[in-house]
Amino acid sequence: MKENLHEKHRQRTRERFLQNGLESFNDHQVLELMLFFSIPRCDTNETAHRLLNKYGSLSAVFDAGYSDFLKQNGVGTNTATLFSIIPELARRYMIDKSTGKRVFKTMDDITELLINHFIGQSEEYVELFMFDASMKLIAHTPIQKGDPNSTSLNPQIIAESVFEHNAVNFLLAHNHPSGSLEPSDFDLSVTREIYRAFLPMNKRLIDHIIVAGGECNLLLQKSLNIEKE
């Protein structure tokens, strides 16, 4: 009887989502709905509340990571895997939606691309984006993981990718999971060095951009202005 009540509740919740989306759902109800797919028969309401109380917000739940999920009562490998997929899937979806065959005409277009690209990333890394002469995105690739200050960004690695893809314009971007948009002295100096190194090759560094907290900080002009002071 109790199992039958759970199934009816699940059916009502699914129908509510299909009719109205998630707008009318509280955060714990969103989690409860997601848990239906990894916990087939049990009441998931209590687990949803417990996860929200533990992590503090819906986004923090999904950002917790596989290993941390497994430490929580009521969470098995299916739930840990499902919740770990969600931020990666959201990022993949937003990147795909914002790129396609689109031409990036303005800096606002570019910053939107970068914010979507780094969404849900907890590890700091540097990404190289390459564009043709019309500013259509050709390709992008990570060129360094971890703190960019730990090792110098190698212009040769950048050049190999830029020439391999026959790019005319390229962009460097890295995230600050801490949420700070402030550049280090290294960020500014390496931006200046790479900009200069590629000028004789007729390859243009559009900018070097820090992404944090859904915002961007453009470093190229700052780095060149510092040199003039």
Image (cartoon, rainbow, N blue to C red):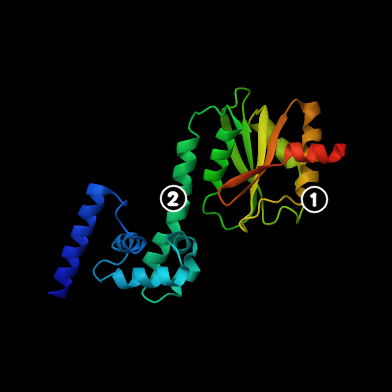
Q: Residue at x 67, y 56 (%)?
A: 146
**Residue 216 visible, this orientation:** yes
In the rendered image of this protein, does residue 107 appear above or below residue 117?
Answer: above
**Residue 152 visible, this orientation:** no
The quadrant of the picture occupied by the C terminus is top right
Q: Residue at x 45, y 60 (%)?
A: 62
- Residue 225, given in percent of the width and then of the height, sits at 81, 37
In the rendered image, which residue does mark 1 sit on? 185
Is disc 1 placed on a helix, strand or loop?
helix
Q: Amino acid at mark 2?
A: Leu
Q: Residue at x 76, y 53 (%)?
A: 151
In the rendered image of this protein, does residue 158 appear above or below residue 13?
Answer: above
Relative to 104, 3 lies left or right: left
In the rendered image of this protein, does residue 95 appear above or below residue 50?
Answer: above
Q: Residues within 10 Å of mark 1 (few under 14, many from 20)?
A: few
Q: Amino acid at mark 1?
A: Asp
In the rendered image, which residue does mark 2 sit on? 89
- Residue 154, given in percent of the width and then of the height, sits at 76, 44
Residue 44 occupies which quadrant of the picture? bottom left
Q: Of all residues shown, which one is farthest toward the right?
A: 229
